[in-house]
Amino acid sequence: MSRKEKILEILKEKKEVSVKELSRIFNVSEMTIYRDIRELEKEGEIKRRHGAVMLNEKENSESLVVDTCPICDKPITRAYPYRITVEEYKVIEACCEHCGFLLHSKYEDKKVSAITYDFITENPIGALNAWYVIGSSAVPCCSPSVIPFASKEDAERFKKGFGGEVMNFIDAYNTIVNNMNINIKSCCHPQTATFRIDQLKKS
């Protein structure tokens, strides 16, 4: 039985399960579990809400409530939205990376990690390790747009076609924060360590 099949078996026994719990059960990384979940989601077998995974009961799918972004109140329609985890248990999703960056301001001095998804492959990447194209002509959600990439090379190629500026996490983060005139003191890491923006800024 494959890991995806085992995940479905677990969900038949439980109403819902977190990615962290699945990671512990199978002794693999959360990134690996996210890849399985993405495939199962595309196959229509499961659905996700508030960081939990559950079986997709197709007969009730039309009545599902769509979550809204805690920053701009837009409905979260992306299959893989920007996701932060606060204190290793509270998972919160934003409609896009622009609002995802601003979401951190609500959790100053908290232990925060975050995951985003490569614009091309939709593979999960730690937000701190991603490269971002800021202010391109492509605006899939909030403006200025923030488009994430796993590699700087892909970001540069996107910039050639759609404009904008290629930035690492810190520069992108500060650009959005300064644009919104918000002082953000917390930061994130793709694993579990806590970073602070004031520690990462260049002196």
Image (cartoon, rainbow, N blue to C red):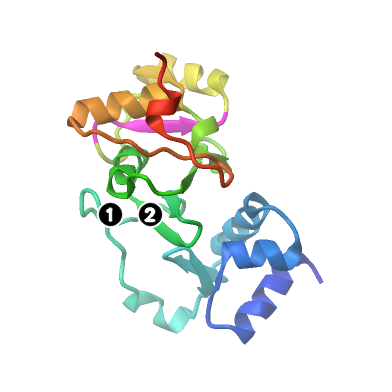
* Residue 153 point in image, percent of width and height: 56, 18
Mark yes or no: residue 96 visible: yes
- In the rendered image, the vertical position of residue 52 relative to residue 201, given as above or below: below
Q: Residue furthest left?
A: 181
> What residue appears at the point 44 percent right and 83 percent down from the top-left corner?
59
Q: Which mark is residue 93?
A: 2
Mark yes or no: residue 137 visible: no
* Residue 2 point in image, percent of width and height: 78, 67
Q: Is residue 41 left or right of residue 199?
A: right
The magenta region covers 143-150
Q: Residues within 10 Å of mark 1 (few under 14, many from 20)?
A: many
> What residue appears at the point 45 percent right and 48 percent down from the top-left corner?
111
Amino acid residing under circle 2: Glu
User: Label 1: which residue?
Assistant: 69
* Mark 2 vs 1: CB contact within 8 A: yes
> What residue appears at the point 52 percent right and 35 percent down from the top-left corner?
120
Q: Is residue 149 magenta?
A: yes
